[in-house]
Amino acid sequence: MYDIPFLDLPPIVGASGTVQLPGSKSISNRVLLLAGLAAGTTTVRGLLDSDDTRVMLDALRALGCLLGRADDGALRVGGLGGRLQVHEADLFLGNAGTAMRPLAATLAVLSTLQGGRFVLRGVPRMHERPIADLVDALRPLGCRIDDLGTPGYPPLSLQGTAGGRLALDAPIRVRGDVSSQFLTALLLALPLAAGTQDVAIEVEGELISKPYVEITLNLLARFGIAVQRQGWQRFTIPAGSAYATPGEIHVEGDASSASYFVALGAIAALGGAPLRIEGVGEGSIQGDIRFVDAAEAMGARVRRGPGWLEVHRGQWPLRPIRLDCTPIPDAAMTLAVMALFAEGTSRLDGIASWRVKETDRITAMAAELGKLGATVSAGDDFIEVTPPAGAWRAAAIHTYDDHRMAMCLSLAACHALLPGRAGDAQPVRILDPRCVAKTFPDYFEALFDVVEATAVPVIAIDGPTASGKGTLAAAVAVALGYGLLDSGALYRATGLAAVDAGLDPEIRPDDEAAVAALAARLPLRFGHGAEAGRTWFTGPRGREITDELRLESTGLLASRVSALPAVRAALHGLQLSFRRAPGLVADGRDMGTVVFPDAELKVFLTASAEQRAQRRHKQLISKGIPASIGALRADLEARDRRDSSRSVSPLKPAEDAQRLDNSGLGIDESVQQVLAWWQARRPFP
Ligand code: DC
């Protein structure tokens, strides 16, 4: 997950490979609530791990459900069997509509029948998302629901005294034309009240987002509730209904999340291999799977099977589309961005619900597509998009704390694929990329795994030993979400491999061919995620070498092997392979001069020999290694001489390098300086 202020996407020019989708948000939160209410333990596989499911899990835990993990990582939910264990709780539900609405209905019903007081609240935007239609449906039943803020919006308080009754003789009436989540909430909650009589729900107005109601009915059936439906107007929960766990349940991949990759395939899967999407496919119970038909209408070529989709580019540029998007409100946002790649104007109707989602999505979409140069017109329930006629503009895209804005606008990075646009290739900046954590925390990682990008930026940070370039490079890489190449580590590993292979640590020129052969196939493995920063040798002498790499003696070995031209040549390709989307920060001696001469920013970092000796001394002492400043300084100066006097790639600043003497600077100041230089080179307004 990129927890940084912005993420710059380089121009995308191809896509292939396989994406594993995270679990469906809609299914995950419904399953969690049902499992939490049912009698017995439910094992849930494929659950989405995201902000929205985390708030639901926290709420269930607060209500007394027992949550645990099976050996294979599946979640085990011990349900309440319809009986409240906890009668008072204050629940924070973030911005998760799929938690707020069903929990409000459930706790209103349970507190009325069994007694209790519950408060439901969320982030400020949650307090702007209407819930009045649900409250209006519940109050006539005898539920006491108090608005704690603006009437009709969360936060809410739900309370009752034990032994209360619900007025269920008349059908419960709920509006269906603003959000189907109100009906879903009632369908999930009212089986708790259907002990001795049928409970009927009647929908007022035309029901929107029917596919989401189908998911609800489908999952209710899995938990033992057979709702009878008359058209989309009347739903009856039969008397005697009670939740029963299915024992195990598997959550499908998220069909809305699939839409970004279906679109990516339609735009960028232009080689022989398709873009394969695993987690949803034929037979999905999610309505957004119908997005695939719309993508096909725009030109995508899609093959589908059980649990998978394979997408190729077909018609190019895409065909414009005119579509009533009522059945696919979420995935429709992806169509609005695909419209940028169509020849002509596209129009999406039936999207009024966009206005009450994570943000006002119609306004947000119009503003951001406009920034890219598109012509957009929008109304209460439609949006019309015409691709840029003139140049595509480099834009910093606001995401409005809306995961879908971030994910669908990331596709704008494909614009260089349009006929005649290769010359306009520009990065796209996504502000607050962390918002994808709502439903797809690793969205950008998944994207970078399957795209081919061009003009991937490199920041080269060169300088003498102990100048602090490793620390600086690592901090800059974290700040920008870029990868890191510590090229010194490759020379260090080569030195270790040479000694492992029985070569003399002196490493003489006649060892050159043998060492170069080792360098060409270093058995290195770098840690990722929780193992970031750790390094291993695989193979016969396999071991973790993280600490060995940092030894002074290894630095000396590296200094010797790095003077051999054949070794430098052998490591060249490996170093280039680190240049991957979204970007690279590379530190070493010749990053800006030899390996990445086209780096967008080159920094030459220095510090006085005295300062460097002191820093190295402090480092060693803190690790409990005895050291003398005088000896360290002499050693540093000897290495400087060897590194700068060797015939190949001597240590020297690139002509176009920014020089930074950090003798008097703290690490933060150096990082800020480099980031300021970087910002100045970016094309964003
Ligand atoms: O940066 P470092 O201390 O880990 O580098 C170890 C040695 O490797 C150093 O003496 C010089 C050499 N080196 C190099 O020649 N070229 C690089 N790009 C990086 C390191």
Image: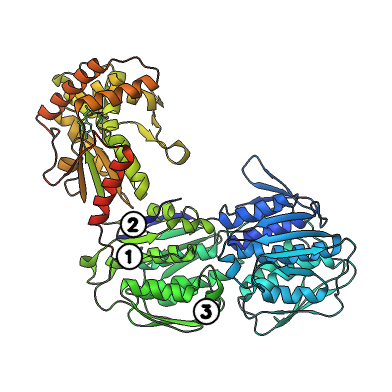
N-terminal of the pair, mark 2 or mark 3, is 2
Residue at 48 percent across and 82 percent down: it is 382
Closest to the observer, 366 or 210 = 366
Of badges 1 and 3, the one in the foreground is 3
Mark 1 → mark 2, Cα distance in angstroms: 13 Å
Closest to the observer, 517 or 422 = 422
Task: Provide the residue designation for mark 3.
Answer: 351
Percent position (x, y) of residue 394? Answer: 28, 66
Residue at 38 percent across and 76 percent down: it is 339
Q: Is residue 232 left or right of residue 602?
A: right
Mark 1: few/some/many CA within 10 Å (<14, 14-19, 20+) = many
Task: Tell me if the residue at label 3 has its CB under 8 Å from ligand 1.
Answer: no
Image quarter hosting the C terminus: bottom left
Task: Tell me if the residue at label 1 has its CB under 8 Å from ligand 1.
Answer: no
Q: Which mark is residue 414?
A: 1
Identify the image's colour scheme: rainbow, by chain, secondary structure or one colour: rainbow
Task: Provide the residue designation for mark 2.
Answer: 8
